C-alpha cells in the first residue's frame, strides 16, 4: 500500500495538551465510520502491527462504553472509555484511558469530512495536561497512530 499518497499528519504543538491527527482515505465517510465502529473490523486495524487486539466490550452508541486489550507475547496493554456522542458518518466523541496510567483520561473527537467519495478524518485528543500529553507522545504513541492509520487505509482499500 502506498501510504505516501495519503499521508497521516500528526501535530503535537509544544505547550498544548492536544494531539491532532489528519488522514484522507479513498473511501466514503460511511465506509470509514463503519471500519472504526464495527467490532469485526476494528480488531483488524487498531494499534501497532506487532500487537494483537481483543475486544472485551464495544458498544458504539452515545452513552456506550468500550474496553480492549492489545497484546504482544505475555505483555498486555488495556484501554477503556465511554462513547459520549456518536453521530454516524459524521462525529464520534469518546474518552480514552490507558489502564497502565490510570486517571489520565483523554477526550477524543473524530470528525469525518466528505470529500465526494473520499474522507478526511480529523481527530483530536485532549489530555488533562501538557505533561500527560508529552508522556503519551514519549511512549511511542505516534508510531501506533501511524501504523493504525496505514492499516485502516489497507483495510478500506481491500473492502472495495
Image (tube, helix red, strand yellow):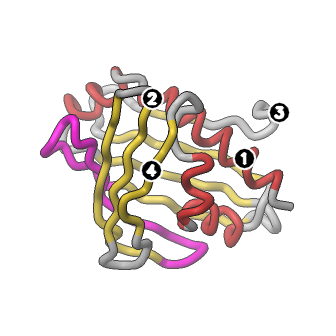
Do labels 1 and 3 touch, CB within 8 Å? no
In which quadrant of the rendered image does the N terminus lie?
top right
Mark earlier in primary sequence (2, 4): 4
| Magenta-span inclusion, residue 120 | no
Using the image, tell me which numbered label, if any, was put on residue 54: 4
User: Range of the magenta residues?
Assistant: 87-107
Q: Residue 61 at what x, y percent from top left? A: 41, 78
Q: Is residue 102 above or below residue 156?
A: above
Task: Tell which tag, 2 or 1, sits nearer the viewer.
Answer: 2
Pointer 3: what residue?
A: 2
* Outermost residue toward the right in this view: 160
Question: Dividing the picture into quarters, in which one does residue 49 lie?
Answer: top right
Is residue 123 or residue 34 the one in the foreground? 34
Task: Tell which tag, 2 or 3, sits nearer the viewer.
Answer: 2
In which quadrant of the rendered image does the C terminus lie?
bottom right
Question: What's the residue at 41%, 66% (across, down)?
Answer: 58
* SS state under label 2: strand
Do labels 2 and 3 touch, CB within 8 Å? no
Pointer 1: what residue?
A: 153
Separation of marks 2 and 1 at Cα, in angstroms: 23 Å
Pointer 2: what residue?
A: 72
Q: How many marks?
A: 4
Separation of marks 4 and 1 at Cα, in angstroms: 21 Å
Do labels 2 and 1 touch, CB within 8 Å? no
Mark earlier in primary sequence (3, 4): 3
Amino acid at each position: 500500500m502506498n501510504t505516501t499518497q495519503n499521508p497521516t499528519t500528526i501535530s503535537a504543538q509544544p505547550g498544548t495538551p492536544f494531539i491532532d491527527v489528519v488522514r484522507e482515505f479513498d473511501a466514503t465517510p460511511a465506509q470509514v465510520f463503519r471500519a472504526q465502529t464495527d467490532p469485526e473490523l476494528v480488531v483488524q486495524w487498531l494499534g501497532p502491527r506487532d500487537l494483537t487486539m481483543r475486544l472485551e466490550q464495544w458498544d458504539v452508541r452515545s452513552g456506550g462504553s468500550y474496553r480492549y486489550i492489545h497484546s504482544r507475547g505475555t505483555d498486555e496493554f488495556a484501554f477503556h472509555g465511554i462513547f459520549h456522542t456518536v453521530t454516524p458518518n459524521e462525529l464520534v466523541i469518546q474518552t480514552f484511558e490507558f489502564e497502565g496510567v490510570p486517571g489520565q483520561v483523554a477526550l477524543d473527537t473524530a470528525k469525518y469530512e466528505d470529500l465526494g467519495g473520499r474522507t478526511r478524518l480529523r481527530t483530536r485528543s485532549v489530555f488533562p495536561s501538557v505533561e500527560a500529553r508529552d508522556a503519551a507522545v514519549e511512549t511511542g504513541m505516534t508510531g501506533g497512530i501511524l501504523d493504525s492509520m496505514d492499516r485502516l487505509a489497507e483495510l478500506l482499500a481491500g473492502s472495495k
